[in-house]
Amino acid sequence: MKVAVITPYYQEPLEMLQRAHDSVAAQTHACTHYMIADGHPRIEVDTWQVRHLTLPKAHHNNGNTPRAKGTSEAIENDFDAIAYLDADNWFEPNHIAGLIEARQKTGADMISSGRVIHGLEGEVLLPLGEQGDGKETADTSTLLFGKTAFPILPLWGSMPDELGPNCDRYIFKGAQTLGCAHHHTGELTMHFTSRYAPHYRAAGRTIPLEATAMHAMKDSDQFIRRIGPKGLSHILSGKPVEDLFKTKHRTPYVVCILKDEDKLSLDEARFCDDLERCLTDTAEFYYATMDEVLADTTVMADRNNVFLLWFGDDEVEKARLGEIADQNGKFAVIYVRCGKSSAGPNCDDTLDRRAWKVVTDSESIKKSYVQTCRYGDGHVIQSTLTNAPDALSALMHKYAR
């Protein structure tokens, strides 16, 4: 089986690049090593047994563009499997052989190994890796993709730069979206150099000054919240990113769903889907906690009409949302209860009259709902937006401040 190993590099020390390459050269299953310079080639690499490619400039997207270049070259040269190795990591000699054996036994499209986590000085931090390795995601350098998983690999090149800090997570999710089967060997055959403070904390070590701050991860998560689950599915399915933002650029409204997407009930998820279909061209949807909304400077600074969609039952949280909406004129709270409500349709003490008007000014929407709107409650909505008209968008314009 022909296996290519793709290593992007930027300005890592030569001895680090040498360590990564030596570990590939020492594999018990022979591999072809591609090393791709992201705008800063080292002439020494030309003398090694590698296929050395150079990009004319640095892309600053966590190695995604050079990975995409190396992947394209490997696919064009008819390799049977592709693995990845970041420049600051290294393999045990049996790493690739173990992944291939697991692929042949299980038939899985994508195989991952375990990893030993090291500090910046080479010291072992977590000898058994991080809890969750190979379950929700897998580090890039642990992964091997068979030909049946190749269709997801162009995502390295099409992924928005905002996703770069968590690129392995989205490659993993993309492969799952494609229907690729995954098998995790758990064998600790990859050595990972960590720059992340949580790894040092977990090991009880002092966090070095040069450790990577987690704000880049948080920026990536914020981007995901802003594009919403449908936007992420759009990206992971390989569709052009430009299409995602054609109608989302400077949209006048933001609908923040104050609940984890995975914790929505079927009725709640259906309601969100129906509302998003109604407002496709006029609103951005994303899932976030109230604290995350308040910390999102793009929402707080750039938007005047933010609708907070809340499904909770906690009275303290309900009161807090009421106070926030009172103090911030750009927020309108819509309280959604998917289920029977005994409350009557009285909106005299509406928390936000704009939100009430948006929902009730259309007769067809009225007929679909049992609604109340009291201070601290917002709107109690029973059924889904099965008959909601396109006029809902116009109503949001009409009652916007």
Image (cartoon, rainbow, N blue to C red):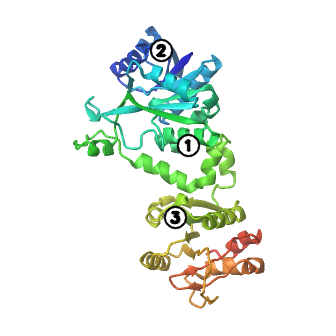
Looking at the image, do the residues carrying marks 1 and 3 touch, with CB atoms under 8 Å apart?
no
Q: Residue furthest front?
A: 105
Residue identifier under label 3 = 259
Name the residue at 54% across, 58% down: 262
Please state which amino acid type lies under the numbered disc 3: Lys
Q: At 55% from the left edge and 24% from the top edge, which residue is drawn?
A: 104
Percent coordinates x, y for residue 148 in the rendering: 64, 29
Q: Whole-percent x and y of residue 222?
A: 49, 54
Within 10 angstroms of label 2, few (less than 14), some, or many (20 or more) residues?
Answer: some
Please give the name of the residue rendered at 52% of the width and 85% of the height, measured from the top-left corner: 375
Residue that badge 1 annotates: 173
Tag 2 residue? 29
Measure the alpha-carbon separation of dots 2 and 3.
47 Å
- Let me know if residue 38 appears in the view: no
Gap between marks 1 and 3 measured at Cα: 21 Å
Question: Which residue sits at x=71%, y=69%?
Answer: 393
For residue 368, the mark is none
Q: Which amino acid, mark 1?
A: Lys
Q: Earlier in the sequence, mark 1 or mark 3?
A: 1
For the N terminus, the quadrant is: top right
Q: Earlier in the sequence, mark 1 or mark 2?
A: 2
Residue 259 at x, y = what percent? 52, 64
Element at label 3: loop
Q: Nearer the viewer, mark 2 or mark 3?
A: 2
Q: Position of residue 311 (x, y in %)?
A: 54, 71
For residue 45, what is the image quadrant? top left
- Indicate which disc, 2 or 3, sits on the residue closer to the N terminus: 2
Query: Quarter-wise, where is residue 91 in the image?
Result: top left
- Looking at the rendered structure, the secondary structure element under dot 2 is loop
Which residue is more in the foreground, 391 or 363?
Answer: 363
Q: Identify the element where label 1 is drawn.
A: helix
